[in-house]
Image (tube, helix red, strand yellow):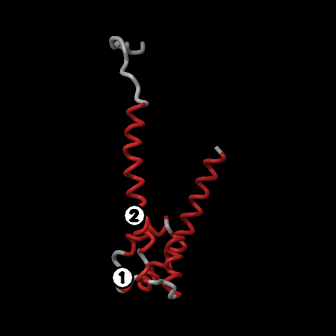
Amino acid sequence: MQTAALLIDLARLWLWAGAVVSVPFLLWGVGRVEPNARGAWIFRPLLIPGVLLIWPLVLWRWLVLETGRDDWAKRHLPPRRAHGFAALLLAVLIPLTILAGLAIRQAPPSGAPVLLAAPE
């Protein structure tokens, strides 16, 4: 039970930290990170759940854009490089998973079905 309580406390701390980050980010940071979000106040409350969960990434991205270290031309190169490897990996793993499932499947039950009686 102590482990469960510890995990719940850690999740609570994570969400509180996200709440602390979300207030300044949604008031000032969104407009600085995304120029199209300037003056758009209606959608910002919709971002609260996401910011609560991924607040370290929000802080990191905000810092990169504020300091000018962002290289826009190379922003999407690492994910694009990974697409070929991911496609090859999936092309191999999906058939292997299906074959493994077929190989270790259980045999159908033998004999006639038995009608269970209700408890008395």
Q: Give coordinates of residue 61: x percent, y percent.
A: 49, 77
For the residue marked with disc 2, what is the amino acid? His
Q: Name the image quarter holding the C terminus.
A: top left
Tell me the residue at 45%/71% (across/down).
78
Of residues 54 and 120, which is closer to you in this image?
54
Q: Crowding at label 2, few (<14), some or many (≥20) Cα neighbours within 10 Å?
A: few
Residue position for label 1: 37
Tell me the residue at 57%/69% (across/down).
17
Tag 1 secondary structure = helix
Tag 2 secondary structure = helix
Marks 2 and 1 in Cβ contact (< 8 Å): no
* Quadrant of the image occupied by residue 35: bottom left
Label 2, label 1: how far apart the Cα atoms are: 30 Å
Q: Give coordinates of residue 5: x percent, y percent.
A: 62, 50
Tell me the residue at 64%/43% (across/down).
1
Q: Earlier in the sequence, mark 2 or mark 1?
A: 1
> Compared with residue 39, is residue 1 higher up or lower down, i.e. above or below?
above
> Compared with residue 76, is residue 93 higher up or lower down, i.e. above or below?
above
Q: Give coordinates of residue 119: x percent, y percent.
A: 42, 15
For the residue marked with disc 1, what is the amino acid? Ala
Of residues 115 and 80, which is closer to you in this image?
80
Q: Give coordinates of residue 38: x percent, y percent.
A: 37, 86
* Quadrant of the image occupied by residue 84: bottom left
Q: How many marks?
A: 2
Residue position for label 2: 83
Residue lying furthest right: 2
